[in-house]
Amino acid sequence: MIAFTVNGERRELDEASPSMPLLWVLRDQLKLTGTKFGCGMGLCGACTVHLNGVAVRSCQLPLAAVAGHSITTIEGLSPDESHPLQLAWVAEDVPQCGYCQSGQIMSAAALLNTGAPVNDDSIRNAMSGNICRCGTYGRINKAIKRAANAPKEA
Amino acid sequence: MSLVENAGFELSRRVFLKQTVAVASGLAIALYLPAGVAATGSKTTGGEFEPNAWVRVLPDGTVKLVVHKHDSGTGTQTALAACVAEELDVNPMTVQVITPEDPFFETYIHPVWKVFSTGGSTSVSLEYDRLRMAGATARALLISAAAQQWKVSPDSCSTEAGRVVHASSQRSLGYGELAGAAAQLPVPANVTLKDPAQFKYIGKLRHKRDAAAKVCGRFKYSIDVQLPGMLVAVIQRAPVVGAKVVAVDSAAALQVPGVRKVIAIPGRPDVLGGNLEGVAVLAETFWAAQQGRKLLEIRWSDSPLAGFDSAELPKAQIAAISDPATQTVKAMAQGDVVGQWPGAAKLLEADYTMPYKVQNPLEPICITAQVKDKAITYWGGVQVPSSALEAAQTVCGIGKDKVTIHELVSGGSFGAREAKYWLFEVAYLAQQTGVPVKLLNSREDEMHALFNHPATLHRVKGALDAQGKLTALQLHAVSPASPEQWEPGYFERPDHMDYSTTEAITAWDFAYRPPHLELNWVKHESHVPGGWYRSVSFIPNVFAVESFMDELAHAAGEDPLAFRLANMQERPRHVAVLKQAAERAGWGQKLPPDTALGIATNQGYTSFIAVVARVAKVDGKARVEKLTCVVDCGLAVSPGGVEEQIYGGLMWGLGHALFDRLDIQQGRVVQSNFHDYRVTRMSDMPPVDILVLDGQPDKPGGVGELGSPSVVPAIANALFSLTGVRQRSTPLSLG
């Protein structure tokens, strides 16, 4: 049995393979499908979740590695979908197809969690591991600044 | 796909009435609407008001608008709903939007291509008129129903947010209350469209539907489809085109917990665009299926393409130009080009090449299907329902009446979802198993799937006279035919033209008019299956033409902007975007040291764009510092959506310029994932400045594929100005 916390709730998995990536545990066993599959190699960021508040690629994290730890997914970012980033994402109308956006928001939330200054450089550093094929980078930048009440640049 | 602007279209007389409708401006426009209340595409019976294929009003007041085009992040659901909603007087952001109850209802057929499909940046531009008509017709009927009930003149009634209002008597009725009565009225032959000055939504939308659901993981994509008894399939496809399965040892794969079946899928070389041979592993989960797949032992037969090497392709492409057996089609010709070579003061010739490129939507191809009781049901993002139907007919022998599609928004397409191989594969697996089968590609599968953007070579030759004036221009665009050839009879037309391979080099899209001009498409098939790809042949054609115009300008000692303008005639919209983009980017002004600008332009989808790239040398390496572009797309139905499409296009163009490249060695794709096939990341994106002009108020042009083509030559031209080195192959080097 492997036990860990997902979105504040303790989960115990009896039959899961310890080597199964967290992404597929979340999607197929816990039915938390907001976390997306994009590349399976930690290169696109669509599967980003938080491990103890830090952004990680869940497609690269075997279940065994999260035993005893706390995981937050897009579904658990806020109880009522009102995290400042979620509100900012809607206000800036960020999503196009939307497929990458769970991962984008989780990466942005991890950036805000660090308390580091939010500016073009820190946003670029935090977000360049998340691929968007539609082309929402400009609005993601604006939305993060909006959520952080940071001054507009660029 | 190309939109052939001068193509007339004839729709089935059985279903359609041609209606000539007087619009408010006094213009008479021809529109096609269903012949009666019965012809709505809806499968419901009774109670609902369904005046046409796009409007449904329920007695409880629910208004549903049908959007019959696929949305892959392009905002079609918002923009198309807005066209109906504007005229019907409901809010397109809050009204319910549904996909067609019957995706094969004839009204939904693409008016030019005659298939059920979304693509070619045509959804808004070609549907605009008839969607407005659909909304206006429904509104007129609801007003008539209210007027009859109140015994007043329809002219004394107005509408407001889903209600008919009689202002002088302060009465109003909701659309739902009028649904039953309106459904009994005959569809009027004439209705009045709104004066565009009165628009509340068209031309004003800054937001799209569904943003809230997409920021909290609630929004459901194809990959999220979950059905009882469903198996997830992954497919190991032939590593070389044409290879066949000789033997499969599936014993080890079947030992993996969760793996249930291994099924060989026959290739369909008999179908244009049909799937390659493959071996599918079906399991309870994707992870289990992938584990099983690693343990498959497959022996593949040899294939004629086993010797194919994409690095060698340009040699064969050059040879094809002068090979008399090659099919060469003149896309445009005037005067005597060859006759100008001997007397020219300067002759220039250059070859431009572009590699294979992969669409890579972030949601990999995913589709679920089940065959049950001699019927097939699909769940997922189906961009081309006609291909889903073709798969059902060809693979399963199932006809149109027995095909159901539960259509979903997809996580990007860019042409990938216009391929049909995956529909054929899932139909086969569904037929073989009888249970719901969810086919999901891995990223490696996306990279290896082919049906992507073909590698091309363009040879361009030009003559300048002693004054530096362009006298003759000749182009040989060497490229395979586009997937438009999948349509029956496509090449049986007398002109043998492939409009999707000759984009930007036909009379309506080509901007320049030197006295002697010859633009050729040289049909050269590498037998690597090609596919649709955002902006299709505009990409290589505009790269070659706009780079070469720059080379000619420099050879003539002319400013590249002035040289372009001098070779354009009677193209006011084109001239306007060029001039404005140049001005915004500071063209002709003094630049900081080690900085240069490059300009390029193209027309397409009845829209115009000019792009200026600014590059600079930093620490010995060049860097793209800014992209400036000006767009004239006529009426921007959803201005926010237009800007998004242009930004996305610029981003794709940057990718083509700097990253996109798929190599094939010994018939096998070399790259496998985003580590060795780069796509544009946030850190790659320079600041962009996008200006969308207020265009003609009554006619929207296409924008989805407008943005990328000019970016590559704009950057290449800027790099030449910066470094003095002309680059003619992508990806370009930044030094």
Image (cartoon, rainbow, N blue to C red):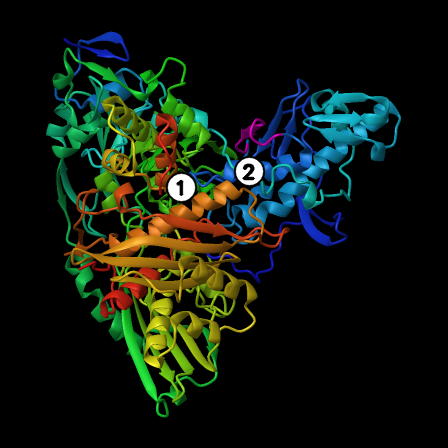
Percent position (x, y) of residue B705? 43, 52
Which chain does the residue under circle 2 lie in?
Answer: B
Percent position (x, y) of residue A136? 37, 39
Residue at the image position 63 percent from the left and 34 percent from the top: B85
Q: Name the residue tied to disc 1.
A: B391
Q: Secondary structure at mark 1?
A: helix
Which chain does the residue under circle 1 lie in?
Answer: B
Q: Is residue B79 above or below residue A111?
A: below
Q: Is residue B59 above or below residue B451?
A: above
Task: Name the amino acid type tagged 1.
Answer: Ala
**Looking at this rendering, what residue extends furthest in the bottom direction?**
B343
- Dividing the picture into quadrants, the one containing residue B395 is top left
Q: Secondary structure at mark 2?
A: loop
- Dividing the picture into quadrants, the one containing residue B98 is top right
- Tag 1 or tag 2, which sits nearer the N-term? 2
By secondary structure, the bulk of the magenta-drawn segment is best described as: loop
In the picture, measured across the screen, residue B305 lies left or right of residue A118, that is left
Instruction: Give the number of the disc on residue A50.
Output: none
In this orientation, which residue lies closer to the viewer: B67 or B568?
B568
Q: Is residue B104 visible?
A: no
Location of the N terminus of chain A (image quadrant): top left
Does the stretch in magenta take in B30? no
Task: Name the amino acid type tagged 2.
Answer: Leu
Q: Name the residue tied to disc 2.
A: B205
Other-residue count near label 1 (Cα within 10 Å), few / some / many at <14 / 14–19 / ≥20: many
Residue at the image position 22 percent from the left and 25 percent from the top: A55
Which stretch appears magenta?
Answer: B91-100
CA separation in Å, label 2 and label 1: 38 Å
